[in-house]
Image (cartoon, rainbow, N blue to C red):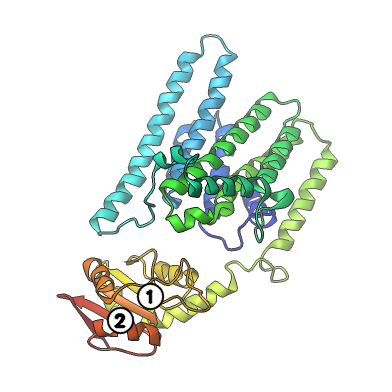
Amino acid sequence: MLYVFSIVIALFLLPLKFISLYVDAPLGLLFGAGIIYIYSERESPFYYPGIGLIFCGLLLLKSWGIVFSMILAGIYLLNEFLVACKKHNSFKEFFSKTLTIFLILGVSIGLTQIIWQIHLRTNGIEDTSMSGGGLAEVLTIGSNPVLTERLRRWARITFFGRAGSGLAGLFSITGVCLLLFLAGLFLSKNHKASRRFTAIIFLFCLINLALLFLAYFVYFPEHEADQLASYERYASEYFAGWFLFVVYQLSVCQDRKLLKNKVCKTIHIVLFAITIICLPWVFELGHVPPKQLIGRREILQPVLDRYDDELFDSETYRIFHIAQNENDLGHHILRYEICPNTSQKNGWSFGHPYPEEIAEPGTRLYTAGDLEEIITSGYEYILITKPDQQFWDLYGNLFTEKRMQGDSLYKIENGQWVLID
């Protein structure tokens, strides 16, 4: 009951950037469940298998899950190390626990990430998200004005937030971090183990923010790295997990008699009431999933139904999606809907930039030859869901048959793009 209650609280009450419930929400919540589990279930006979399951869940949810798995392992080991320092002849036990946790982490990575990479290679799926930089770039920050500006932007957003973000002002990334830390210390009063664990979570929060900054050098495309795209949302993943632990601390305050029985019950009743009010079926608040996403899926469904026989047989295909001046939501919803088939991650609008640009990261101008090479070399189908006159003017000669309006599907056979009626 506590987990369900805490999850709903974290989703609806925190001033975090969960405008839409991306995969970041379940990642942060599972991370928080991991923190609580490591702290509270040490006497369980299934303690280590449970940690392994949490690692596997984090690794499967998102690529950043490997970082969160390592952070959970770090939280566990640092806590055990500090406990060992207070006891005599306990470092042998600590060494054994270290080997155990690294073995569990290694097995979890083997069961998830390695198998996933084999799947990607087997089906010819390329990871297009890596930037052209590397960690070596970090060493040039002092002499590289672009990288220096990126560092300044990161520091400014971290401490003060930015316009239009839910993490700004008092609730900037730094502000939320300190608020959670102070709340945790208050709820840990007269309980050294809980206070120590809160300090460890705070330390690894700082480490997570630093790792996020480094990720913009080695993982994100350059145009996203310069803008620190979605930085607040990624930082919110850790905060959601930390918030769950704070709720857990509140739930045990009554047992430790930190707060009076009536005070604890009052706090829980208030939080529960606010949670109920914030549920999507009460006064139509919340809208989960957001109504605009439902509408986009409904628009795509007839298109996918038309080509069901071609795209959803027993094979897995690489599909090149074209949607002129379409934003990223429309493209990525289609990528989800065509699973288990795959599509390109970036670049679905082509030609000269539009006066009112909607596509993100922007419409790309290729020569007809370059676009033909990109498509022919790595895809079995071309799915056009939103053509326009500019597209046909620039790239129409690549198609033997054209459907000027509406959607169309082309199969790539021997270098030819064959229209499927």
The answer to whether residue 57 shows anywhere in this view is no
Whether residue 296 is situated above or below residue 263 in the rendered picture: below
User: Going from the N terminus, do you reach mark 1 or mark 2 first?
Assistant: 1
Horizontal side of 64 relative to 28 (left or right) equals left
Give the residue type that dot 2 points to.
Tyr
Q: Is residue 189 visible?
A: yes
Quadrant assignment, res 196: top right
Residue nearest the observer in this picture, 327 or 353 = 353
Marks 1 and 2, Cα distance to the nearest angstrom? 9 Å
Q: Nearer the viewer, residue 314 or 17?
A: 17
Residue in the image at 34% along x and 43% along y? 111
Q: Which mark is residue 350?
A: 1
Check residue 395 in the rendering and tell me which mark sits there, or answer none.
2
179 or 73, nearer to the observer:
179
Label 2 crowding class (10 Å Cα cut-off): few <14, some 14-19, many 20+?
A: some
Residue with the most extreme top position:
88
Q: Is residue 85 above or below residue 272?
A: above
Left or right for 242, reference 70 = right
- Kindly identify which numbered label has been placed on residue 281: none
Quarter of the figure that contains the C terminus: bottom left
Q: Quadrant of residue 191?
A: top right
Residue 379, position in %: x, y?
25, 69
Task: Tell whether label 2 touches label 1 (CB within 8 Å).
Answer: yes
Which residue is depicted at the point 25% across and 59% down? 124
- Residue at 60% x, 14% y: name it: 86
13 left or right of 224? right
Q: Position of residue 220 (x, y in %)?
A: 44, 53
User: Which of the pair 287/199 is nearer the observer?
Assistant: 199
Please state which amino acid type lies under the numbered disc 1.
Answer: Phe
Q: Secondary structure at mark 1?
A: loop
Left or right relative to 153: residue 342: left
Find residue 90 and report its horizontal and vertical position in percent.
51, 13
